[in-house]
Amino acid sequence: MAATQIDHELDVRGLLCPMPVVKTAKAMKELAPGAVLKLLATDRGSITDIPAWAETTGNELLEWHEEGDTLVFVIRKAAD
């Protein structure tokens, strides 16, 4: 499987709910449809908040995993 092309990276480490979702939503608005955002977070609430936000907004959560203390989410912006 080829690596996913990342178009933008957003670092919200150290921010607590609801800021990771708020900042993710703002960043996604600036991306073109189909663009991919890599989100770095440390708030454990993001494990449920980000997938729920993606489903609600129609964006696609491609994957998420943990790298040490950092939660890494890869999200593709929905087509308009």
Image (cartoon, rainbow, N blue to C red):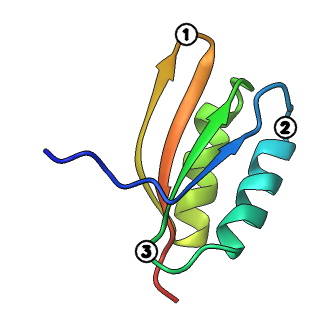
- Determine which residue is flagged by label 2: 17
Task: Tell me which label, 2 or 3, sits earlier in the chain.
Answer: 2
Question: On the picture, is 60 further left or further right than 30?
Answer: left
The residue tagged with tag 1: helix, strand or loop? loop
With respect to residue 44, does 40 lie above or below?
A: below
Task: Tell me which label, 2 or 1, sits earlier in the chain.
Answer: 2
CA gap, disc 2 to disc 3?
A: 26 Å
Image marks 3 and 1: residues in contact by CB distance under 8 Å: no
Residue at x 36% of width, y 55% of height? 5
Snapshot quadrant of residue 48: top right
Quadrant of the frame with the N terminus: top left
Q: Looking at numbered disc 2 in the image, what kind of residue is underneath it?
A: Cys
- Relative image position of residue 27 (x, y in whole percent): 72, 63
Q: Nearer the viewer, mark 2 or mark 1?
A: 1
Residue at x 60% of width, y 66% of height? 56
Q: How many marks?
A: 3
